[in-house]
Image (cartoon, rainbow, N blue to C red):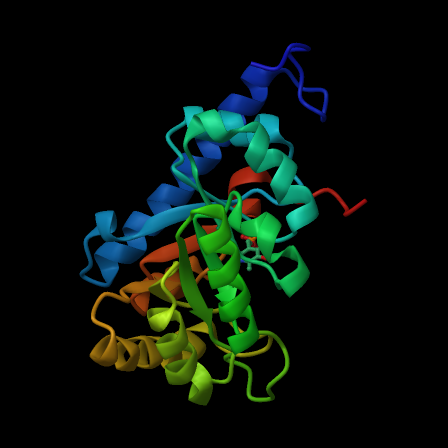
Amino acid sequence: MADSGRTHLGRTDTGRRDELAANLARVHERMAGAAESAGRDPAAVTLVVITKTWPAEDVALLAELGVTDVGENRDQEAAPKAHALTSLRLRWHFVGQLQTNKVRSVVSYADVVESVDRLRLVTALDKAAGAAGRRVVCLIQVGLDSEPGRGGAEPALVPELAAAVAAAPHCELGGVMAVAPLGEDPLAAFSRLADIAEALRQDHPGATVVSAGMTADLEQAITCGATHVRVGSAVLGHRPPVR
Ligand SMILES: *Cc1c(COP(=O)(O)O)cnc(C)c1O
């Protein structure tokens, strides 16, 4: 794969490939176990591997191992990786806080923006996607914290945001996304998300995506109906410190 035959960690690509394969198998086992316990079809849950801080070589290995969806949270890091790997035909999810001045770059590679949390962002995404001749799937990021302001839209604002996305010609309303708040039982938080998602589907039957659950709480998310889990460290290892 890489010319040097080594990853940035100095192990051989074969070693890294085996490590990723074993980690992926374990994560798929966890996902299937949770789905079966909840009486759900394991095939109804998609794994999005969050590759932030890891090199493009790892993303290429993941694609070889059958991963179809990857996610990143910072445009500066995601843009060069995604553009270098276009031939792999992965679906790129943007999952981080998004400033409007990054929107033009993000729509050039992202198929899904999971962190839509305000009206101005919908306007900017629609305009940029239109200019680029692209269509972007948008998830409304819902803040599940009791105090607002920790990321994500307040639940009461979801209908208005969803209507704006649905009306935007270059955006498609996919559903909702959330991160479980710190210090709360994720099951309680994700069951609130499930109620919000159900209410959204009353108005927008096509908005079926529920993106919830990470390394620590993917089982609880699947129990509560997640269709997508976003897993980083259980697949790639503990993230190296941000440079
Ligand atoms: C980093 C990140 C994840 C993955 O977290 P892990 O705990 O490493 O699985 C999921 N979602 C978002 C929004 C992230 O930023």
Q: Residue at image x 65%, y 49%?
A: 75
Frontmost residue, 182 versus 209: 209
- Left or right for 140, reference 184: left
- Name the quadrant containing residue 176: bottom left
In this picture, is 113 found above or below 82?
A: below
Whole-percent x and y of residue 22? 45, 31
Frontmost residue, 9 versus 88: 88
- Left or right for 5, reference 207: right
Q: Residue at image x 55%, y 82%?
A: 145
Whole-percent x and y of residue 18? 50, 23
The answer to whether residue 152 is seen in the rendering is no
In this picture, is 243 found above or below 149?
A: above
- Name the quadrant containing residue 54: top right
Frontmost residue, 202 versus 12: 202
Counting the numbered discs, the total is 0
Whole-percent x and y of residue 121? 55, 69
The answer to whether residue 92 is seen in the rendering is yes
Quadrant location of ligand 1?
Answer: bottom right
Whole-percent x and y of residue 76? 70, 46
Q: Residue at image x 53%, y 79%?
A: 184
Quadrant in which the C terminus appears:
top right
Quadrant in which the N terminus appears:
top right
Q: Residue furthest front?
A: 131
- Name the quadrant containing residue 58: top right
